[in-house]
Amino acid sequence: MTQAAISVRGLHKRYGEFEAVRGIDLDVHPGEIFAFLGPNGAGKTTTQRMLTTLLEPTAGEATVAGADLRREPLTVRRRIGYVAQGGMTEPEAHPGEELVDQAMLFGIDRPEAERRGRALLDTLDLAGTWDRRIGTLSGGQRRRLDIALGLVHDPGLLFLDEPSTGLDPQARAN
């Protein structure tokens, strides 16, 4: 049997007396698409932030992309992509430089980073934006750039927090 891409047992997150996440157990297998659905405040983003090493769990165990969440957080980070709910780019920056910088953080050399970045911009209907200021892009274009940033290092596992926010119906379908 194939190892799960994500395996979680008893994952908890507390903030003082407030229990934000209460004992999640789940397995996500390679090739599966898994979604957290629920109302605001249900712990969806908190759970994703724990699984992407941005928050430390209060209790529980998890293996993400073949690495132990607590003992190997750097390995988890190298193997995943994460697209946050809100954009992480600066309005004065350019999509091309952001993509190249992101790829180079993962050890990809500049020529390959540029090739990947340009290919992603083309794939995500962002051709022609390489040298534009991010602040001049529409909300949907910025969201698609966020997705490109999560994919540029070719992660084995991708986390998307509120993936359709800011995308029009055609962009969502694509």
Image: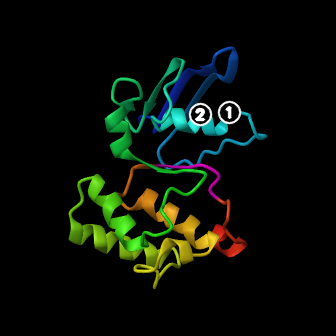
Kind of residue indicated by mark 2: Thr
Q: Specify how the rendered protein is coloured.
A: rainbow
Is 105 covered by the magenta stretch?
Answer: no
Q: Quarter of the image containing the N terminus? A: top left
- Dot 1: what SS? loop
Q: Residue at x 45, y 39 (%)?
A: 5
Cβ atoms under marks 1 and 2 closer than 8 Å = yes
Pick whichever, 118 or 158, lies toward us.
Answer: 118
Q: Which residue is mark 2?
A: 47
- Which residue: 55% across, 77% down? 136
For disc 1, the marked residue is: 43
Q: Position of residue 79 (x, y in %)?
A: 36, 45
Query: How many marks can you see?
Result: 2
Q: What are the residue bounds of the magenta stretch?
A: 158-163
The outermost residue toward the right is 39
Q: Which residue, as the protein is rendered here, is positioned at the far bottom?
A: 128
Rendering coords of residue 18 (x, y %):
70, 19
Indicate the position of residue 58 as horizontal and vertical percent values.
54, 18
The correct choice, above or below, for 95 with respect to 29 in the image is below
Q: Helix, strand, or loop for circle 2?
A: helix
* Left or right of 145 in this view: 85: right
Q: Indicate left or right for 53 with 86 as reference.
A: left
Residue 97 in which image quadrant? bottom left
